[in-house]
Each structure stands twice: as C-alpha cells, then as structure tokens.
Amino acid sequence: MIKILVVHPTRLIGSLLTTVLREEEDIFVTGQAQTADEALYQLAVAPCHIALVAANLPDNGALRLTEQITAAYADVKVLVFGMPKAERVILQYVLAGAAGYVLQEVPVAQLFDNIRAAHQDEALVSPGIAAAFMRQLAEMAHISATTTLNQAGMAELTPREVEVLALIGDGLTNQGIADQLVIELGTVKNHVHNILRKLDVRSREEAAAHLPLLDEQE
C-alpha cells in the first residue's frame, strides 16, 4: 500500500484529488494539507511514503517544502505535480531532492504511473530533462574544480548574503530569491553584487561553489 500526503493550496482541489486517489486499490491517502507548515505537521503525525506537492503553493512554497522534506524525512519521496514545462524550473526541484514531477497537462492516469514509479525509486523523467540535469552536474563539477575558494571573502558575508548565496546554490533566479525572502528584487540584486565582489568571482555559479565552506565554518 502506497501512503500519500496530498498538499494543495486549494482545499476543494485537494479533496477532489484525494477522492480520485482513494479509488486506487494500492493507494492510501494519509491526509491533506494546504500549506507547507500543515504538510510538515501531517508528516510528523501520520508518516507516508510520498508527499504529493502542488507546484503552485504560494511564496515558492513547493520548492521550500521539497527541500525541507528531503532534509528531515529520508524515507519520504516528494512528487511535485502541476509543473510548467520549463527546464529551468524542473531542474530546481530535481536539485532540491524531488523524486519526480508531473507536468500540468498530463492526464490523471499518468499521475498514477508517476506515483507508482516514485514509490519504486523509478522516477519518470523526460530524456530532455535527464540530459539537462547531467549537463548541470557536469558544469557544477567543473566550476567546483576550477574555482579558487575565498575563505576570507566568505567570512565577510552578512547573514542575509549567506541566505542569498544558499538560494543561488539552489538554482533560484533573482526574482525567485526575492519571492522566497519576501524582499524587493533590487535588494536581491544588491546582495548578489556584494557577494560576487566579496568572493572576488565573476559568476553566480562560481559564488555557489563556495557553499561547502559554510559547513566548515559551523
């Protein structure tokens, strides 16, 4: 039996999805949540195998929830549904730890296929996304190997700049960072400029290569 937590910001849609899922003999819905906080509470009181998370949670909530579940619940897989067909967005979720994704336009039958695949550790990823993911990993490995880490510069970063740097490492755009931290886009641009200057690097990717130094400083 596959135990699933449904997370959708609209209660009616979440209820309809729950009803559909309960018609499947091998699926049991442990609960519903409308927010990331509700989802984390549900996971604490009713363990499940898969968190079925809607991509349209407000304030970039789906991505943050994916990261939180991945970090706190090693046995829970995150399947994000309602995803736009955008390579950059999908890669953000894959890098955040999502076990799979379901695009906006797919039929319900394919949602069931993705749920069962994720449960069996067989994520259904398109060839294009798989290739993009491999390119991303190769690029990150190359940058990490060729970037001279600036420990003194890392020590100069403010707590907010460290937050911004971590989100850069998650692949978020400036707008995505602004949405997540609830700050102005111009403020984010200033933080990014300061980070690049303090670390003496030329790109966001080179800056993100410094993230392992954070663990050393703790």
Image: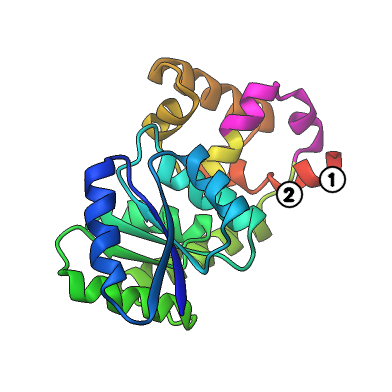
In front of the other: 74 or 26: 26
Residue 204, image x, y percentages = 52, 40
Quarter location, residue 5: bottom left
Q: How much space separates mark 1 and mark 2, taking CA atoms?
A: 7 Å
Give amino acid for label 1: Glu
Kindly state the secondary structure of the residue where label 1 is placed.
Answer: helix
Of 183 and 71, the residue lying toward us: 71
Q: Is residue 191 above or below residue 12?
A: above
**Residue drawn where x is 25% and y is 62% of the image:** 19
Residue 73 lies in what quarter of the image? bottom right
Magenta stretch in the rendered image? 150-164
Residue pictured at 25% horizontal, 58% vertical: 17
Magenta region includes residue 158: yes
Q: Is residue 150 above or below residue 3?
A: above
Q: Residue at x 71, y 25 (%)?
A: 157
Q: Looking at the magenta stretch, what is its main secondary structure? A: helix
Residue 206 at x, y = what percent?
Answer: 59, 45
Residue count near mark 2 (Cα–Cα under 10 Å), binned few <14, some 14–19, many ≥20:
few
**Residues tagged 1 and 2 counted as in contact (Cβ below 8 A):** yes
In the image, 28: left or right of 193? left
Query: Amino acid type of disc 2?
Result: Pro
Q: Is residue 215 left or right of residue 58?
A: right
Task: Report which residue position mark 1 lands on.
Answer: 216
Residue that label 2 marks:
212
